[in-house]
Amino acid sequence: MKRIWFLVLLLPLSLAFASDASACSCGGKPSIAASKRSYHRIFAGEVVNIERKTSTIIVLGKFVLGKVSELFGGQGYDSTGRDYGLQVTFRTSRTFQGPALPEVVVNTGFGGGDCGYRFEVGGSYLVYAREVKNGSPDVGICSRTGTLEERHDDIVELRLAYN
């Protein structure tokens, strides 16, 4: 009997939030020139650490509570800035745009539908990151971020622009 009540409550909730779910869609990578205008930090570096920010259950709970709050006239869930996903620490080798720091920490999703970039510890990348309201710069697959080998042409153009 408890399972039936659980399903009765779960079905309307899942239908109410179904329109908010979306997969990542980029519409293509921006040009280097557009990226220089749109991204606050552009740097090359090696990934030295990757940490999970918080559990998906906590984020889901915040989202559901935010939706309930909206139903009663509250503010709802503020989704600006990632409070889930991964924090990736880079040892920078070259900064093209933004403050020149020896280490930079960025946020990204887990990959797949949340637009997160899948970094690997020890990998070297050219990173295009946006500043967000609540935390570290944010990086996703819709930017020009990629391995140094993949972004060789970007590096050549950036060196010419920033020397």
Image (tube, rainbow, N blue to C red):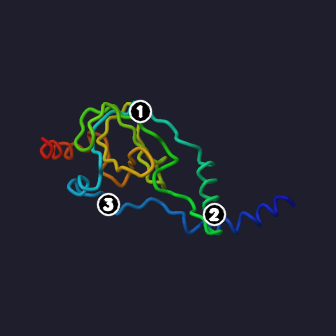
**Residue 85: x %, y % from top left:** 50, 45
* Along the viewing direction, whichever of 32 and 74 lies nearer the viewer: 74
Looking at marks 2 and 1 on the same chain, the residue that comes earlier in the sequence is marked by 2
**Residue 118: x %, y % from top left:** 42, 43
* Along the viewing direction, whichever of 160 and 37 lies nearer the viewer: 37
Residue identifier under label 3: 28
Residue displayed at 47% across by 48% down: 109
Question: For the residues carrying marks 2 and 3, which lies nearer the camera in this image?
Answer: 2
Residue displayed at 42% across by 38% down: 88
38 up-or-down from 155: above or below:
below
Q: CA distance from mark 2 to mark 3?
A: 36 Å
Looking at marks 2 and 3 on the same chain, the residue that comes earlier in the sequence is marked by 3
Looking at the rendered image, the quarter that the C terminus falls into is: top left
Looking at marks 3 and 1 on the same chain, the residue that comes earlier in the sequence is marked by 3
Left or right: 47 in relation to 55: left
Numbered disc 2: secondary structure: helix
Left or right: 29 in relation to 52: left
Left or right: 33 in relation to 90: left
Looking at the picture, which amino acid does disc 1 mark? Val
Looking at the picture, which amino acid does disc 2 mark? Ser
Please say if the residues under marks 3 and 1 sit with CB atoms less than 8 Å apart.
no
Q: Tell me the tag on residue 109.
A: none
Left or right: 87 in relation to 161: right
Q: CA distance from mark 2 to mark 1?
A: 39 Å
Q: Quadrant of residue 6?
A: bottom right
Residue identifier under label 2: 69
Q: Tell me the tag on residue 121.
A: 1
Looking at the picture, which amino acid does disc 3 mark? Gly
Q: Residues within 10 Å of mark 1 (few under 14, many from 20)?
A: few
**Residue 101: x %, y % from top left:** 30, 34
48 up-or-down from 128: above or below:
above
Q: CA distance from mark 3 to mark 1?
A: 26 Å
